[in-house]
Amino acid sequence: MAERETQVVERVPKQLFAGGTWRDARSGAVFKVEDPSTGSVLCEVADAGTEDGFAALDAAVAAQPSWAKHAPRERGEILRRAYELLMQRQDDLALLMTLEMGKPFAEAKGEIAYAADFLRWFSEEAVRIEGGYSLSPNGQARFLIMRQPVGPSMLITPWNFPMAMGTRKIGPAIAAGCTMVLKPAQQTPLSALALADILREAGLPEGVLSVLPTSDAGGVTEPLLRDGRIRKVSFTGSTGVGRKLLEQSADQVLRTSMELGGNAPFLVFDDADLDAAVEGAMQAKMRNIGEACTAANRLYVQSGVATEFARKLSERMGALKLGRGTEDGVQVGPLIDAKAREKVQSLVDDAVGRGARVLVGGSAGDGDGYFYRPTVLADVPQSSELSTTEIFGPVAPIISFDTEDEALAAANDTEYGLVSYLYTRDLNRALRVSEALETGMVGLNQGIVSNPAAPFGGVKHSGLGREGGTVGIEEFLETKYIGVGGV
């Protein structure tokens, strides 16, 4: 296995990808990529600076006119070929992701399939960009409506889904005819570099996509956003960083789409199928080791079933195998770094200090790497930091409630509004509560909502715009109206 790990890492380009070529950073700088399961260095990659950013932007601007005229069918075929290459190399790409991010191999393999599906979905959407033609109300003119690409776009992706968050942005941008500059997260640049190489192999023209790994995100992105030639920014990450990007984007009045933080409530009513609710909680909480904006952050369980739910969930969480994601049978890998683990421990300590009980877990794992044991807490007070802070780790805090109104008030008592989950067998309650929850998505009797064919996004401080579904391509299109007179 060690030999294969080395081979997989060695095959990935370690340079910047700009203007269709691989090259070193202008400064010659590099930064280290770490394996979070061991704390050891996997490799070094080129560290982009401001000059590299402008070189990538120059390439995107130069390529935009011809790329916008590229036949939609061929844009779709490029995406389709890239989809097939991802699926052919699924095992190697999954291993690469496990090494740089930590998630278990089986889950990483699932992400590659999920990521590939965005390319397949938008390959089909490329030929379905529609306009309109109609007569004016007074009959004196014609309205011609057309859709055109927004133009050069800045894409900024997070470390927790390093391949899928790339394809979720790149797919619609390619389909719409936009050129792109992609800045992947510093912790996980290898998946993005591997994706760029696959798109190059699939026939993406020079300059359409550049990838800039960097240890200085602000130093690279801010000058480009203020330059005036970037016309769109798509970001997935924390709400704090999203606010800064919105401020920077305001100068040039950029189109923005933001998928930001979450604080997902998971509601279980006493008429729910309890086993199904526990299974849904496992999916919603433990997907990606809990390091997901869609992760169930607060589990509100009606008093009549709270004890039984906590017992069943604790049994499931306590049975999960913790370890390096490359090992057989491992279900929970490490957190991304030491800072992330320290944050999780601090949140658990705060809750326990306020009266919460640890039913299982509650401490860091043994040995090297940034492991934290799957944890269930009962009797968590609403005043705890866990109730207001995105955990981003394998901790399930259970808070009991008595009435539907009480549950809704607690669920909506947050600045975030990405996703919520609801378990009940009462149809009227299901519809009533789903409508009242202040989130962009609701998982009704299911623990996973993400799907390339569905619109993903939130409200309030969880973001702007939607990704995926039939509306995902809209973020990269402008509407132009041509008034035709004298007809």
Image (cartoon, grey):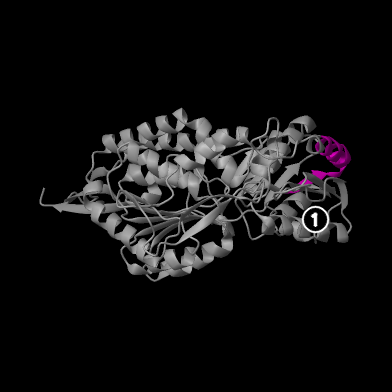
Closest to the observer: 21 or 163?
Answer: 21
Residue drawn at 43 percent across, 58 percent down: 256
Which residue position holds label 1? Answer: 348
Residue drawn at 42 percent across, 55 percent down: 212
Residue that extends furthest to the bottom in the rendered view of this protein? 251
Q: Quadrant of residue 269?
A: top right
Q: In what quadrant of the picture does the N terminus appear?
A: top right
Looking at the image, residue 211 sits to the left or right of residue 41; the answer is left
- Image: 478 above or below 285: below
At mark 1, the secondary structure is helix
Closest to the observer: 427 or 86?
Answer: 86
Residue that extends furthest to the left in the rendered view of this protein? 486
- Where is residue 176? Give x, y as percent: 33, 45
Look at the image and say whether residue 201 sits in the magenta stretch. Answer: no
- Where is residue 196? Give x, y as percent: 39, 44
Closest to the observer: 140 or 354?
Answer: 354
**Amino acid type at image mark 1:** Val
Q: Magenta segment range?
A: 298-315
- Image: 90 above or below 227: above
Closest to the observer: 112 or 387?
Answer: 112
- Where is residue 453? Give x, y as percent: 48, 36
Question: Taken as a whole, is the magenta stretch helix, strand or loop?
Answer: helix
